[in-house]
């Protein structure tokens, strides 16, 4: 894989900047407008079975948010021009929970794109709220391959000589993340020997767990850094489920505890919890995907909010 990065250039009007630590370097944006493109991906190597018994190739409609040109307070601009001159940007793949869609997490996903990440959120074909015949959780074991497929499709789009994502993604800096069943999916893609995708460089598991019924779970050598988050009042994914994989994970690893928080609200609309999750996850991505000095110290500070959140750090 190509590991070199092009020189960074100036910013569009309305973008804020931070000066880099490299003498003579041009300012690097700290915040972007957020563009949105919807991709209708189709995995023809696998199928789904419809309620009438018919089969069809596996569809993966994917919302892609990305750093765009424009004022930083503008969000989800349809098909907006990308801030390509300031890239390439790390890629983050997000998995939604059972019986919902990525729309529930729009604020969180926007925050990542605004901070300088390309964020791809597929709609899992049989677990989403609008799945044919209703959501089917038995399809969970097929979702890790969905995430890997979306990684491949996004990298292929970035390798093209033209197109909206040409040159926009750094193929050497990829994270997977998800909430609830989407967190189970991301955990498997990052670490499970059955599903592991070695292109993954970091993982953020939001109230997730090991996929049930797939056997013993072990972390292979060279596992990517882990950030897990967990509400202490979550009854759908209790803290013990997160502790089960966090306790055996190798360093570096971090655990954000949200006191009194339940399963979905901290990742959709509950404040100040959502803001804490946004800031902590961005600091984690900045530390392990952008390798920014001071990001990991910032992570620990941002995750320690008396009465609301605590962060266990094992770097």
Image (spheres, rainbow, N blue to C red):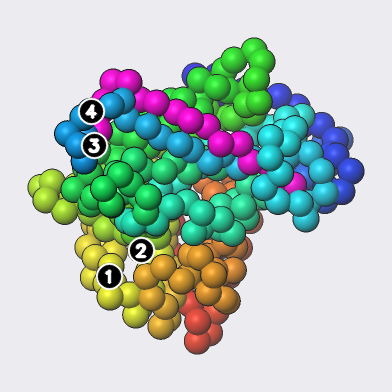
Q: CA distance from mark 3 to mark 4?
A: 6 Å
Q: Inspect this view and state whether residue 21 appears.
A: no
Residue that badge 4 annotates: 55
- Identify which residue, 114 or 298, lies in the foreground: 114
Q: Residues within 10 Å of mark 3 (few under 14, many from 20)?
A: few
Among the two numbered marks 1 and 3 on one chain, the one whose residue lies closer to the N terminus = 3
Residue that badge 2 annotates: 207
Give the residues in magenta: 33-48
Q: Residues within 10 Å of mark 2 (few under 14, many from 20)?
A: many
Rendered residue at 56%/36% (across/down):
38
How far across and down, in percent of the image, does residue 147 sit?
Answer: 37, 37
Q: Nearer the viewer, mark 4 or mark 1?
A: 4
Residue that badge 1 annotates: 236
State if disc 2 and disc 1 touch (CB < 8 Å). Answer: yes
Q: Secondary structure at mark 4?
A: strand
Residue that badge 3 annotates: 50
Rendered residue at 69%/35% (across/down):
79
Q: Secondary structure at mark 1?
A: loop
Q: CA distance from mark 4 to mark 1?
A: 32 Å
How far across and down, in percent of the image, does residue 249 sit?
Answer: 28, 54
Among the two numbered marks 3 and 2 on one chain, the one whose residue lies closer to the N terminus = 3
- Identify which residue, 148 or 308, lies in the foreground: 148
Q: CA distance from mark 1 to mark 2?
A: 9 Å
């Amino acid at each position: 894989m190509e590991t070199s990065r092009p020189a960074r250039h100036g910013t569009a009007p309305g973008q804020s900047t931070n000066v880099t630590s490299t003498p003579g370097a041009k300012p690097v944006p700290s915040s972007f407008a957020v563009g949105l493109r919807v991709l209708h991906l189709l995995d023809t190597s696998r199928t789904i079975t419809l309620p009438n018994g018919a089969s069809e190739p596996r569809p993966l409609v994917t919302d892609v948010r990305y750093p765009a040109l424009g004022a930083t307070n503008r969000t989800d601009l349809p098909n907006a021009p990308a801030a390509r001159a300031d890239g390439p940007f790390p890629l983050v793949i997000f998995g939604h929970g059972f019986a919902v869609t990525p729309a529930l997490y729009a604020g969180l996903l926007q925050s990542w794109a605004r901070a300088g990440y390309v964020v791809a959120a597929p709609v899992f074909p049989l677990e989403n709220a609008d799945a044919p015949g209703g959501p089917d959780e038995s399809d969970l074991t097929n979702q890790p391959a969905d995430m890997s497929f979306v990684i491949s499709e996004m990298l292929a789009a970035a390798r093209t000589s033209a197109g909206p994502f040409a040159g926009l993604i750094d193929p050497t800096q990829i994270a997977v993340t998800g909430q609830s069943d989407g967190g189970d999916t991301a955990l498997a893609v990052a670490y499970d020997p059955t599903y592991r995708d070695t292109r993954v460089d970091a993982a953020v598991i939001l109230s997730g767990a090991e996929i049930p019924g797939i056997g013993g779970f072990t972390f292979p050598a060279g596992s990517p850094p882990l950030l897990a988050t967990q509400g202490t009042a979550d009854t759908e994914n209790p803290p013990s489920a997160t502790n089960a994989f966090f306790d055996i994970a190798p360093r570096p690893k971090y655990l954000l505890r949200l006191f009194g928080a339940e399963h979905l609200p901290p990742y959709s609309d509950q404040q100040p919890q959502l803001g804490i999750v946004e800031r902590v996850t961005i600091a984690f991505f900045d530390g392990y995907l952008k390798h920014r000095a001071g990001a990991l110290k910032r992570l620990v500070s941002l995750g320690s909010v008396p009465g609301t959140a605590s962060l266990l750090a094992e770097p």
